[in-house]
Image: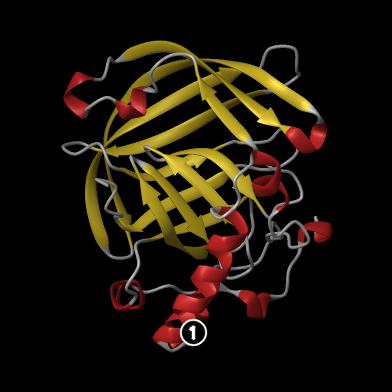
Amino acid sequence: MDKYSIRKDNSITDLSRIPLSRRTFCLMTLASMVTGCSSDSQFQHAAKAVQIDVSSFPDVPITRQQVDNLPYASIGAKLGKGPRSMLVLGKAHHQEAHWYSANRVAIVTRHGRIIKTAGLEKNLTNTMFYNKDPLATPTGQKAAKHSWIRAVDMAEDQRYQIALPTTWREEGHETIEILGQTYNTLKITENVVARNMDWKYSNTFWLDAQSGIPWRSIQHFHPELPPFVIEIFKVPDLAG
């Protein structure tokens, strides 16, 4: 697991101690690496030399005050048994959010689902939806059981259009806590079987019972890496 290690002083939690002008510059630099690229291949190679930590280290403390003091929407992300890091929003448009860490890892989500990554040793380079993602459906209209399909690319492995048939199941309501705030959520489990690959997994989402915001999720994105655990700290404005 050490091959995925990075230095601990690259933690995004130090962002709150950086003056606003420097924070803005850091975000602009990351944005130019990932969102400023016009092609998927450029996105794929952004920050390729830096890996996120999946070793068994304790989480770096992140407080609600730190989150509230930042002028950006933010999420917490934990890869496998690695420490939790904070990622901040660099770009948002039509439910698609681009999140960046201080160590140049990027995660792109749509309706809370991971659709691309960059800066990891292995990355999800594209996601295509053959049916409407249930996460895009308002909470009150979601079916208790649902089957749908999407496909993904893993260009670094020369694997393209990997079909992912998925079954969606409601597990009931559950109260969760994130940085001292509690949320009434609907717990969802997805079971996924990748066609033409030996890859089966389950994703879990905790959706706000009213708004459908995915406050917490456990999402697999590559067969050779553990899942991401993602928590929303500050909700982004995705109306634009």
Q: Which residue has dot 1 on it?
A: 22
Q: Report the label total.
A: 1
Point out residue 68 in the picture as x, y percentages from the top left corner.
Answer: 28, 73
Identify which residue, 62 or 131, lies in the foreground: 131
Whether residue 60 is visible: no
Identify which residue, 58 or 195, lies in the foreground: 195
Write the residue at 27% across / 24% down: 137
Q: Is residue 4 above or below residue 159?
A: below
Location of residue 221 (image quadrant):
top right
User: Pointer 1: residues within 10 angstroms few (<14), some, or many (20+)?
Assistant: few
Point out residue 181 in the picture as x, y percentages from the top left corner.
Answer: 24, 60
Query: Relative to 97, is 5 on the left or the right?
Result: right
Location of residue 71 (image quadrant):
bottom left
User: Which residue type does callout 1 highlight?
Assistant: Arg
Point out residue 65 in the picture as x, y percentages from the top left corner.
Answer: 30, 77
Whether residue 39 is visible: yes
Query: Relative to 85, is 66 on the left or the right?
Result: left
Write the residue at 35% across / 67% down: 72
Location of residue 78 (image quadrant):
bottom right
Identify which residue, 188 or 27, lies in the foreground: 27
